[in-house]
Image (tube, rainbow, N blue to C red):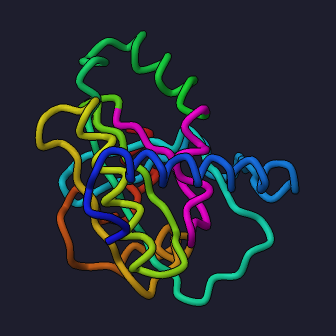
Amino acid sequence: MLDDGQPATTVGHFVRSAATTARLLAAGQLSQPTTHLARPLRFADGTTSYVFRETVADGVSTADPTVLVVRFSLRMVGTSPWWHAAFRRECVLHTPLFAGFPGFRSKLWLTDLQTGVYRGMYEWDGAGLAADYAETLARLLRIVSVRRSVRHHIVAGVRRDALLRDTTLVTDGPGWSRLIPPEPAASRSA
């Protein structure tokens, strides 16, 4: 764990991340690919989330690939489509809160329009670094999220893009974090 959970220390982690993110942006090492935009991802709990943004750290290698899935429901947004649309637009401003953490490689930003649940599907270099980030993020998210909606799940040894291609790479873990195969094309058009 990065710290003892004290608010000042947590803020310090985010400040360091923002400074590192600024350096990455200045060096052209962060990008927002559009490859996965609007892609539906089905989860074992019966929900479907859609990718609305992607952030990637470019030009860095990954020795210990780890997938981190985070979920939360925002308290102030409720079920308002307008507030959800506003959040999806402004959340690009949150990039400095994660992209500069040690081990960050990529993030898919996901929304479930039916339930109002947001997810982040990340790739990290190292399960310990992913856990440190997830615990720090959870302290921030709990302030603005519906009680007990903040969760995270870590899967070591798996690359995010490999999991997107083959959902059978991960067969355990909570349903809200576990991908299942896409819906067959025939049933989507029906």
Depicted 182 relative to depicted 173: above or below: above
Residue 84 x %, y %: 40, 20
Which quadrant of the structure image shows residue 99? bottom right
Residue at the (32%, 79%) spot, across then down = 170
Depicted 76 relative to depicted 189: above or below: above
Residue 104 on the magenta span: yes
Which quadrant of the structure image shows residue 79? top left
Pick the quarter of the image with the C terminus.
Answer: top left
> Residues in magenta?
93-112
Single out the residue that lies furthest toward the left.
Answer: 148
Pick the quarter of the image with the N terminus.
Answer: bottom left
Q: Is residue 143 left or right of residue 112?
A: left
Judging depth in this view, the residue of 188 and 98 nearest the camera is 98
Q: In this view, does 174 lie to the left or right of 51?
A: left
Residue 66 x %, y %: 46, 78
Single out the residue that lies furthest toward the right.
Answer: 27
Q: How many discs appear?
A: 0
Q: In this view, does 70 lie to the left or right of 56?
A: left
Residue at the (48%, 54%) spot, across then down = 13
Judging depth in this view, the residue of 94 and 172 nearest the camera is 94
